Amino acid sequence: MIRAPLRPLARILAARRRGENPDAIERENLRLRHEAMRDRARRRAEGRLLVLAALFLAGFTVIGGQMAVLARSEPSEPRAGAGGARILTQRADITDRRGRVLATNFDTHSLYAQPHRMIDPEGAAAKLAGIFPDLDAARLTRDFTGKRKFLWIRRTLSPEQKQAVHDIGEPGLLFGPREMRLYPNGRLAAHVLGGTRFGDEGVSAAEVVGTAGIEKALDARLRDPARAHEPLALSLDLSVQAAMEKVLAGGMSIMNAKGAAGILMDAASGEIVALASLPDFDPNDRPAPPTAGAPDDSPLFNRAVQGVYELGSTAKTFTIAQALERGQVAPDTIVNTESPMKWGRFTIRDFRDYGNELSVTKVLVKSSNVGTARIAVETGAERQQAFLKSLGLLDPVPLEITEAGGSQPLLPGNWSELSTMTISYGHGLAISPLHLAAAYATIVGGGRQVTPTLLRDPDRAPGPRVISESTSATMRDLLRLVVTEGTASLAEVPGYAVAGKTGTADKPKAQGGGYHDDRVIATFAGMFPAHDPRYVIVVTLDEPVETSGSEPRRTAGWTAVPVAAEIIRRTAPLLGLRPAIEQAGTAAIRRTSN
Amino acid sequence: MMRSLVHVLTALAVIGLAFWAYRENYRTQEALARADRLQSDVAEARQRLRMLSAEWAYLNRPDRLMALVEMNYDRLGLMPLQPYQFGRIDQIAYPRPEPDLTITNPVDVMNDGERP
């Protein structure tokens, strides 16, 4: 690098000649050189600052641009997301208490047509009518050759039908994917499950909407996308339900009944293990609702829940339980049972004359209307009403199916003293078999209110106390006596210590004006085992006649009770209940080991 | 000298990193494609599972099982579960030891003449 010399000889000599100090020249030059160096350094620093600023600007631009892109772009799932969290079905499965499928979804296809894309509309119409016998070829031809651009032909297709339609080779016939609700067990538990239909339909998907039963009542839960993958577990047990339906159907035909209902309920939690109503239907092919005739003639009618009947003497249990709870009577108190009993211009009779007086125990065991009515009069109308309300007998049952709203009990308009007497033995108050099951569970299961449920929930909190533990124990003993020496003797199932009460009520005439004298509702409400009730059973037969004897018998003891006993014999082993030797009274038999 | 070495090393590092980034990019894309494939496999398997479980439930419906039991009654002899079929463990006898009938030691058979 060539530098300007600090002491240029020419200037030094000239300065010496003039007598100046040559060092001044050197300092001058040194100063100039330093100034030049300073300027260079400043320029370089400025350049660097500029580069740095440019870099920062670029950085901020990139970050800002990225932020703008993120803010403007549509959010999307990361591609490497977990596979398990995907929504698989649009409607959750329904299973029984042990996880066996009651309702599931099935992938199938729907068939639709776009006539303007068809090559041979007449031929396609003829071939379609050949595949589906219920379609009309002439009508299809009219649709295909008309002005329509789109029409549905079938909602669902089987794989064979789909292949057959595919083989027609018509480009105007198209398939759309469909998810179809399938009830693999057919008629089993049809009244609980209800049914579904297609809601809003599109080419690529269709909504499945519940129309009845639990499918409708819990529609929102079943369609909740967040819970669609976890099945809804019911409290029903598939095998117990099947056994009950089979026995009930057999009993219904033997007893010549036109309908039957059965409920088996866990006495402690209120979980319904089996609920049947006959005649039934196939929820896969749900019949149309009836437009004429009585509602209970339709197979859609759920007798166990919607059928509000006067359930006869089974209600005596409530009267006696209340009297015992109040301390008004003890089991051995003697009651006047002189029949017939006159009250104003009304007469109350017993089925047979049981003599002039009976103990309270015998009133229940022999089922004396007169004795029960006398006890109820003493209790009073208001207390009776309050007690029945605390048992849940005056309100619809809050069961998780839509039909439960139809279980509103029929009450007397004016709860007079006469109503009190008739209601005490089961006339004048119409309730459903489900009400009866819940109330019996409350009375025999320790006295806390039991609310029936269809959902699997083993840890339900017990309801408020209705009667005391000791009254509950007394009622268990009394109801056991009804079976061992009273009207329900055919309910005895060795090993299971059945206890319960029969009820036979004349059916009211449909057009009003009194009761039929040859049509009854026969009911058995009971529980087993009597010393520690695990299950409550209610069996109701509609218009049963037992004709094996010399004259037709209609009382519940001859009709509903044998059916209930057979149900217990079949279902108790399925429920894992081991037959036990009954403990006589309070003296417990101890097993000693040697 | 030192400085040019640093330059060369830096250039090499940049080339190496670029190659690494290039390879990682392709590996990521391949992994994503594989994840997609697996997910569609899972979805397909789930769909098959649903189909099969529906079919299982249909084939095990109580009506059909009862009909099958009745059809095969002479071979299987199945009856509904009855209360008397419950037992206690102490009601079951211990299996008896099998009597030992095998003869391992030789047996002498002798004929000691005619008897009167």
Image (cartoon, coloured by chain):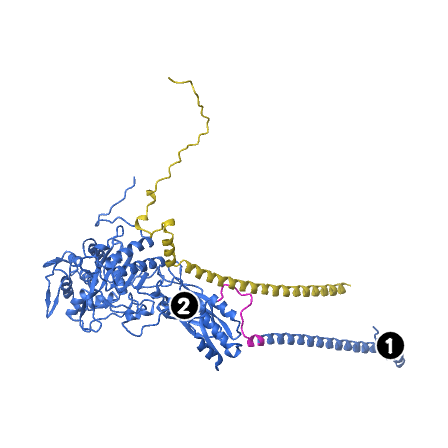
Chain colours: A blue, B yellow
Question: Along the horizontal axis of the image, is A167 left or right of A14?
Answer: left
User: Could you confirm whether marks 1 and 2 are on the same chain?
Assistant: yes
**Crowd band around label 1 with a 10 angstrom C-alpha radius: few (<14), some (14–19), many (20+):** few
Query: In the image, which disc is placed on residue A222?
Result: 2
Give the residue type at disc 2. Leu
Q: Chief secondary structure of the magenta span? A: loop
Instruction: Indicate the quadrant where residue A11 lies.
Output: bottom right
Magenta segment: A68-86
Question: Along the horizontal axis of the image, is A351 left or right of A300?
Answer: left
Question: Along the horizontal axis of the image, is A84 left or right of A447?
Answer: right
Tell me the mark number nearer the camera, choosing from 1 and 2.
2
Residue assigned mark 1: A8
Instruction: Indicate the quadrant where residue B23 lies.
Output: bottom right
Q: Nearer the viewer, residue A504 or A544?
A: A544
Q: Residue at x 27, y 52 (%)?
A: A496
Rendered location of residue A39, percent (x, y):
75, 78
Rendered location of residue A147, percent (x, y):
48, 82
Q: What subunit carries mark 1?
A: A
Rendered location of residue A130, percent (x, y):
46, 71
Is residue A318 in sight in this rendering? no
Question: Along the horizontal axis of the image, is A563 left or right of A125?
Answer: left
Q: Residue at x 18, y 53 (%)?
A: A485
Q: Is residue A84 magenta?
A: yes
Q: Is residue A408 magenta?
A: no
Q: Quadrant of the C terminus of chain A?
A: top left
Q: Answer above or below: position of A138 versus A437.
A: below
Secondary element under disc 1, as helix, strand or loop, is loop
